[in-house]
Image (spheres, rainbow, N blue to C red):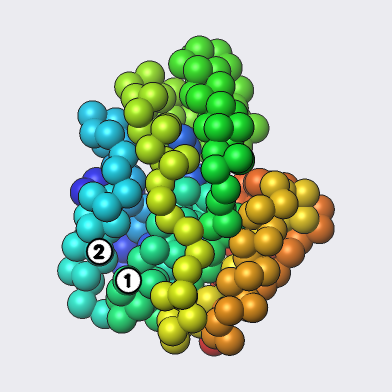
Amino acid sequence: MYADEYGKQNEQIIVMLHGAFIVHTFGRQYALAEKYHLIVPHIMGYGNHTDQTFRTESAVAELVQYIAVFGKPVTLIGFSLGAQLAYELVCRRPDLFERAIIISPWLLKSEQEMPRILEQNENQFHSMQNKRKCRLIAFMAGLPKKQRAEFVNQMQNMSIDTVKNSVDNGIVLDDRFRSVQIPIIALAGGKEYPAIIESVKRMAAENENCSCQIWPKAAHNVPPVFAKRFNALIHAVMQK
């Protein structure tokens, strides 16, 4: 599995699972490499792995194998698709993690909603096939210049099946989460899709080790747009 690493000299490891499409979702968190060892795996079907098609079981197994090699519990942070994978990881292998921050997970899904969400993601995919639009999206997402260029090239090779499988990924809130013992922060923007807001509220309601934060002014954009506040939250969590 390919991964970008920042701050290798630091002892505390933070594994960051990016959202759909944009590997450098956490581009504005890379400054934290001054204190922490940041690792950003390229999820199957994305980034340097666009030659593959995203499949949930394979992606989770690959991440478990990759993280287990560290030989000690690490901090896990995930956004959007990465948040759903983070949820699945802490449910299956909580022993691999010291703590987790799960941002904007869509865990409460219905058959009625799925076609609409899928259509939105397919439209976004087709927009990103246009290099000019892709550059603009990367700029608005807060990607540094070097990462913007990488993103445009990566998007030209991504498959529509990866998009479809990422949306209909089978990851939902279930009873397994109740027994997870590590501290977790579930976070969503107050302007997000209602099912995402309800997902983080339900996570906190079902597990006493999970706290919920709703940031009223945020939408589906916490890592890039609210970077200062989010970085401060990460630092505070790491100091506990």
Residue 41 visible: yes
- Whether tag 2 and tag 1 are in contact, CB under 8 A, the answer is yes
Instruction: Report x, y in % for residue 90.
Output: 39, 71
Is 154 positioned to the left or the right of 107 in the image? left
Relative to 40, does residue 137 appear above or below in the rendering?
above
Q: Which mark is residue 82?
A: none
Relative to 105, does residue 10 appear above or below in the rendering?
below
**Which amino acid type is marked by label 2?**
Val
Instruction: Report x, y in % for residue 111.
Output: 55, 43
Mark pair 2, 1: CA separation: 9 Å
Please give the residue where the numbered disc 1 appears in the rendered image. Answer: 92
Residue 77 visible: no
Instruction: Report x, y in % for residue 86.
Output: 42, 62
Relative to 53, does residue 2 appear above or below in the rendering?
below
Question: How many residues crowd mark 1 within 10 Å: few (<14), some (14–19), many (20+)?
Answer: some
Q: Earlier in the sequence, mark 2 or mark 1?
A: 2
Residue occupying image coordinates x 52% and y 53%? 79
SS for dot 1? helix
Residue occupying image coordinates x 41% and y 51%? 170
2 or 1: mark nearer the eye: 1
Is 136 positioned to the left or the right of 23 in the image? right
Farthest residue to the front: give it: 111
**Which amino acid type is marked by label 1?**
Arg
SS for dot 2? helix
Residue occupying image coordinates x 23% and y 50%? 58
Q: Nearer the viewer, residue 205 or 135?
A: 205
Please give the residue where the numbered disc 2 appears in the rendered image. Answer: 64
Instruction: Report x, y in % for residue 211.
Output: 63, 78
Residue occupying image coordinates x 62% and y 62%? 199
Question: How many residues crowd mark 2 within 10 Å: few (<14), some (14–19), many (20+)?
Answer: some
Q: Quadrant of residue 108?
A: bottom right
Is 129 positioned to the left or the right of 139 in the image? left
